[in-house]
Image: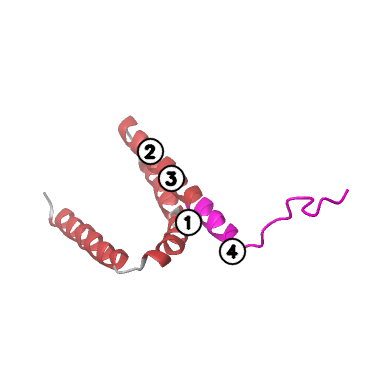
Amino acid sequence: MSQELYTNLAIFVLSLLVGFEVISKIPATLHTPMMSGANAIHGVVVVGAILVALEADTPAFYVIAFIAAFLGAINVSGGYVVTDRMLEMFSKPKDKGNKGGDK
């Protein structure tokens, strides 16, 4: 294995550890708003998957690029769904019709 692979693997492992430490220190009340915004940023993953697909030269790489783009798109849309549901909690309740019995 090359030195570049070891360097990239070390950076990946260190980023996992730092990410875990940062996320574990966030209080539960702030976790959902923070994660819903962070999930929307995963559009970068979709762009990266498209760039990988452009460089693919075997069917296996095409499959991996498709899976990465698909999972990234699910993560992006899920972030927006969570954000929408969270914002609904802070909106005024909608009028459910006739509460007073008037016709």
User: Which residue is situated farthest in the right direction here?
Assistant: 103
Question: For this rendering, which residue is in front, 70 or 7?
Answer: 70
Identify the residue position indicated by label 4 in the image.
90
Write down the quadrant of residue 71 in the picture. Answer: top left
**Quadrant hosting residue 28:** bottom left
- Coloring applied to the structure: secondary structure
Identify the mark nearer the N-term, 3 or 1: 1
Residue found at the far front of this picture:
101
The rendered magenta stretch, by its main secondary structure, is classed as loop
The residue positioned farthest toward the top in the image shown: 59
Q: Nearer the viewer, mark 1 or mark 2?
A: 1
Q: Disc 3 or disc 4, which is closer to the eye?
A: 4
Label disc, if present, on residue 28 of the rendered structure: none
The amino acid type of the residue labelled 1 equals Ala
Q: Are marks 1 and 4 in contact (CB under 8 Å)?
A: no
The residue carrying mark 1 is 40
